[in-house]
Image (tube, rainbow, N blue to C red):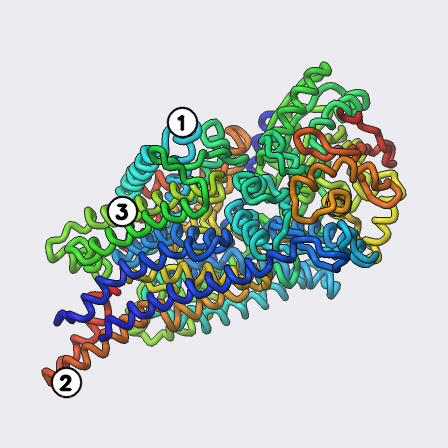
Amino acid sequence: MEVELFFQQIVNGLVLGSVYSLVALGITLIYGIMQLPNFAHGHLYMLGAYLTLFMMTMYGFHYWPAILVSVAVLVLIGMLLERLVFRPLHNAPHINSMIAAVGVMLFIEALARKMWGSDYHRLDSPYEDAISLFGLTITQQRLIIIIAAIVLMIGLNLFLKRTVIGSTIEAMAQNREGAFLVGINANKVSLLTFGIASGLAAAAASLAAPINLVYPSMGAMVNLKAFVIIVLGGMGSIPGAVLGGYILGLAESISGTYINSEYKDLAAFVILVLILTLKPTGLFAKEAR
Amino acid sequence: MKGKRNVLLALSAAASLLFLTACGNQAASGGDSAGSSGSGQAREVAIGWSGPQSGGQALYGKNTLNGLQMAIDDMNAAGGIKVGSDTVKLKLEALDDKYLPNETATNARRLRSENKATIIFTPHSGGVFALQTFNVQEKFLIAAYTSEPKVTEANNPLTVRIPPSYDNYPKTFSEEMMNRFGKKAALVPGTHQYAKDWSALFKQTWTGLGGEIVAENPVDYNKESDFAPAVTKALAAKPDVLFVGGASQPTALVIKAARDQGFSGGFIVMDQAKLEEMEPILKDPKLLEGFIGVNPASLYPTEGTKKFVERYKKKFGADKVPTSEVAYHYMAMHVFAKAMELAGTTDDAAAIRAKIAEACKQLSDDDIPSLAKGITEDGALIVVPRATTMKEGKYVQIPLPVKQ
Amino acid sequence: MKKNPVHNRVSKLAVPVLTLIAAAIPLLTSNTYYLDIFIKVFIWTIAVSGMNIIAGYTGQLSLAHAGFFGIGAYALGLLMTKAEMPFLPSLAIAVVLTGLVGSVVGVISLRLKGHYFAIFSLCVGVIILLIIEKWESLTEGVRGLLGIPIPKIGSLEFATISAQYYLILFFLILTLLVNRRVIHSLVGRTFLSIRNSEELAEALGINVMQSKILAFVYSTVLAGLAGALYAGYIRFLGPDIANVEHTFDMLLYLLVGGISTLWGPLVGTALVTVLMQWLQSWQEYRMIIFGPILVILVMFLPYGIIGAFVRRKMKRQWEQEMQENSIERPGMRDQRLAGGELDA
């Protein structure tokens, strides 16, 4: 029984980690290209969940098509934000774009509340049933989250390493000046990156929503934890974001069970403080800052 | 020359603030005469409200406002209330405090100074505490919608607590559940203060009745997204009954998680979670077999409640059900209005407070939902809801002992 | 830079004149709502001026500010309720305690640069909030700390709102005067040099780390002072006062008023607070309006209201000097505007 409990928590940790990783990936991509910590990311996540919800309830879409629509719309919104808000601020002091991100965040949350109310909504997916796997009870949805997250991450990796467009993003992240020298258009890359990151957030939210609830402040804590992850993993580092996400997910799940679930949140931040005290650039820092 | 410009700016900013103040002073003093009773005048009196209109608690805030507004509309449509020889119509003035006590304080001052409100509603204990530091000085009544006991322990003569205290529930709930399911209980409550207090009382009651607490695993209902881990841990101790509670929607998710993991025992649910809000989340009513909690206010067995629910549905939609905060605010507004009539004043907070017990007696269960029976010494309205439990697919109401 | 005698004289007059006006306000109105607004503006201005020192003058965006506000507030609250200490000693200890915590946090966090520091400070703020929330035996946790007694100094009890007003106004003026000395001193210029370029400052022989820590500690001291005054005024505390949302609010005030200007914090806080009160009737639209305003501000008016005035004044001054001297020095103009002697 003890062993079962343990494995159950491992599975729960992987589920949490998948969601965290997808969100962290988006934030780290944006940071790597634009040197901008996108504080509004959690709210893009929230918008993604709401869009999926409304595609399903108002227009009768099925789960997967609804997610596709949501991702597409969020990609557009992301690109719009980049073009209208963050690109003009690129040469301004860093503090300005951070503040703009805060402004966008406040705006999106207020807009969501105005349009959709503050109620909690249920997002039904067709995968509600629980199945038995190796003696563990796990709902299908949770399994889907883990699988879908892995698929997305592999897909992203292939995109970045194997396609031409993807490699321009990699190039810019690795060496900005070098990328310019070979003629890479920074604006296009930023646009694309923001779009992809927003799309990832929408996907993460839509996958996670059925096991939580959809409401306007659903993105706030996830966002904060995602920031903890990318600082731990090294800002701008993709493997760092993924690894960090799963580590945090597992740590939360296990400490929540075996230590006190109340101090779970504190744990994440205390770990952050400890690691940054010892290694100020994070575990997998790419840049020599 | 140029430096002057900045200083001029600062000076003019200060001057305009001064100007505003002076104007405001005039307006304030100009309004004083409205308070006194003329002979047979029609006047308008403001009822104040400060609560969350944005943020996570916005829905809750909206519900309380709906209850107040409905009551005010009803009374105004019937021609207003008679205070002394004046006909008084009521006006609801609501301000957003974002659930922050210092904003509640600012709002209350504004409601008092600008709107001359003598009664100010607030639906969170933090707001009440902030107001209790100056409401006696500023002479206004706090209509406190919170079960927090310290609100009435404060000996504030101008505080009226509306909802019932929760200490009436644990014994009845525990007895019922122990009889049906067994003596082992596990707790998975929220981490907020209300949940902690409730849990403490529950544990005491449960063990006092001979039961055993096999696990306790609080989890933050507000921040947590996935309750499965917490539930797993509690279920590992093989309880007969699970004690849960926090906001309605997360509570529903906890229940669902337990059922998903094969739990077939009973649920004791804190009054904070409303049955009528949990059902839509759970979709399958069978999941609630073995549930015991407070009876939805909309099912309170009086004529007045039925009428109230009908009117609510007409106004907000046939699929909407008024929750207890709506009903209690509706009821409280009527009680306060009646008290104003009996006291013959809309400004004297102490006089209004003195007439509340009588107001409750003069109103009727046939018109008013969940009507209070009176008010205790320390300012709590005496409200007695019922418990409800699901037995074999049907909801059964269980009476609760009447206090005091 | 030529000293403008008129400018100096007038700006020296600014503080006394404004003080007189501010002192007169409670005599002109008994409207407790207005007085309450003023008091809140004063309290937040003190905190925002602290943020101005670290973020504006030294260029390090600390997002933990609300956390330190909370430490100051709870320190005073706990000392006055649980230890039953009188107001002034509690205030002093609260401020010193916040500064101490600030120095520890500063030493750890200021080794990080730029964005890392911002995010780390954000997390520190969250940690402080969580500690206040969870350490119930000390802080009463989520239920909140009740019954903080009315501040008393000797036999003077600050029971009425007017009395509280004067008490807090006193500390505001004190803060403004100290800030002015700091900004105009060598220390202040050191901060500015760090903001402009840390490497350059290092090369000039400035101990960058020490200066950053000094700025950070001073900013936390101001936040702690504001928090303690808040506790004495509202007399009820909940953990939410340390919430990061307040940090964002303060950032908004600072930006509107003018980052790295002396009067920026006061103007920004006053303006936004009054505006928010006016917009009360547009509850749901408040952030829908303010969010984009923040963005627009940061894009088109990044130095805030006071900042914009100052820059225009400096431009005119420079142009005047150019005419007088008729020397073409293309690089100098941008240098000055970028951050030479911004003060107002």
Q: Residue A227, percent across and down?
A: 43, 50
Q: Residue B84, percent across and down?
A: 76, 49
Instruction: Determine the residue positioned at 40% across, 45% down.
Output: C163
The residue type indicated by label 3 comes to Tyr
The residue type indicated by label 2 comes to Gln
On what subunit does the disc labeled 1 rest?
A: C
Nearest the camera: B296 or C11? C11
Same chain for labels 2 and 1? Say yes or no: yes
The vertical placement of B231 against B312, above or below, is above
Same chain for labels 3 and 2? Say yes or no: yes
Q: Is residue B279 visible?
A: no
Q: Which residue is mark 1?
A: C84
Nearest the camera: C157 or C274? C157
Quadrant in which residue B5 is drawn? bottom left
Q: Residue B65, percent across and down?
A: 69, 52
On what subunit does the disc labeled 3 rest?
A: C
The tally of labels here is 3
* SS state under label 3: helix
Numbered disc in front, either 2 or 1: 1
| C11 lies left or right of A85 | left
Q: Earlier in the sequence, mark 2 or mark 1?
A: 1
| A92 lies left or right of B299 | left
Q: Is residue B205 visible?
A: yes
Instruction: Mark 3 and mark 2 in contact? Answer it, CB < 8 Å.
Output: no
* SS state under label 1: loop
Q: Which residue is mark 3?
A: C218
Measure the alpha-carbon separation of dots 3 and 2.
41 Å
- For residue B60, the mark is none
Nearest the camera: B108 or C266? B108
Name the quadrant of the N terminus of chain B.
bottom left
Quadrant in which residue C131 is drawn? top left
Q: Which residue is mark 2?
A: C323
